[in-house]
Amino acid sequence: MLLRFTKMHGLGNDFVVIDLITQRFKLKPHHIRKIADRHFGIGCDQVLTVEIPTQPDVDFCYRIYNAEGSEVEQCGNGARCFARFIRDKRMTGKHKIKVETLAGIIELELTENRQVRVDMGEPILDPKRIPFTADQQASDYALDVNGDTWHVGAVSMGNPHVIFPVTDVDTAPVETIGPVTESHPRFPQRVNVGFMQIVDRDTIRLRVFERGVGETLACGTGACAAVVSGIVQGKLNTTVTVHLPGGNLSIHWQGPGQPVIMTGPAATVFEGQIQI
């Protein structure tokens, strides 16, 4: 079957977006791996699908697959691309869109300057729900990695994140600490690994080693988790600019009981068809 696709990116975090409403096809893990392969396929960090929702009062179902074929709960950069895709394809005329994800319902809003604002929902700080093995909830936790003890933050934005504080993201041990921590036994569902440098109370720099993907140029949920962790620790203000290798995001969180709001760009690269 020839499957139509659109290649997109959010700050360099790249996606293949596939409409599975007008195209009737069931993607399997080996299809995902073929599509995501940068040498023999299209190439992407993740594959996103647009599907019919299963819940009432929801506009679309949004599914996310890592390059190695596993399905994940949430992706912030992907959510912005998803919103841009369904508007550009005229699948909706709405400016505010409710979509169903494995992590729950999120709301996407397209702004007048072609940015996308995403209500990512309330962050999860309870270790049992992240999930993360800890005696009790705290602002930071001692975590042993490769014989060293780090004091890290742990947050779920529908997917689990651990945040390592570093003095300089350019020299952070992403390549060594990232893959080891991703499968750390205290994170039973594996974890996305962030390295956060606080520049000032309104600005951070961030690199993220994503679960099942590796380091990416940007991670929307990672940016949200890092800012939440910094606010919980009393180190950041409620609105923070996050500098990622691929560009900048604005993250706003007013505190417990409130949703995290992420604002940033999404861009289309090209369209095509692939034989599946």
Image (cartoon, rainbow, N blue to C red):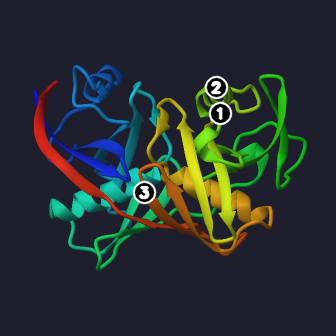
Q: Is residue 235 above or below residue 197?
A: below
Q: Is residue 21 above or below residue 240?
A: above
Judged left or right of residue 23, residue 176 is: right
Q: Residue at x 38, y 67 (%)?
A: 57
x and y percentages locating residue 239 in the rendered image: 60, 74
x and y percentages locating residue 19 in the rendered image: 21, 46
Callout 3: helix, strand or loop?
strand
Q: Residues within 10 Å of mark 3 (few under 14, many from 20)?
A: some
Q: CA distance from mark 2 to mark 1?
A: 5 Å
| Residue 55 showing in the rendered view | no
Callout 2: helix, strand or loop?
helix
Q: Residue at x 71, y 40 (%)?
A: 131
Callout 1: helix, strand or loop?
loop
Q: Are marks 2 and 1 in contact (CB under 8 Å)?
A: yes
Judged left or right of residue 132, residue 75 is: left
Q: Is residue 15 above or below residue 231?
A: above
Which of the marked residues, 3 or 1, is nearer the chain's N terminus? Answer: 1
Judged left or right of residue 13, residue 272 is: left
What label sits on residue 176 in the rendered view? 2
**Residue that lies at the very extreme toward the bottom in this rendered image:** 112
Identify the amino acid type marked 3. Gly
Judged left or right of residue 111, residue 105 is: right
What residue sits right under mark 3 in the picture? 247
What residue sits right under mark 1 in the picture? 173
Identify the amino acid type marked 2. Thr
Q: Residue at x 38, y 50 (%)?
A: 78
What label sits on residue 106 in the rendered view? none
| Residue 188 showing in the rendered view | yes
Give the quadrant of residue 152: top right
Quarter of the picture holding the C terminus: top left
**Residue that lies at the very extreme toward the right in this rendered image:** 135
Observer-nearest residue: 90 or 191? 191
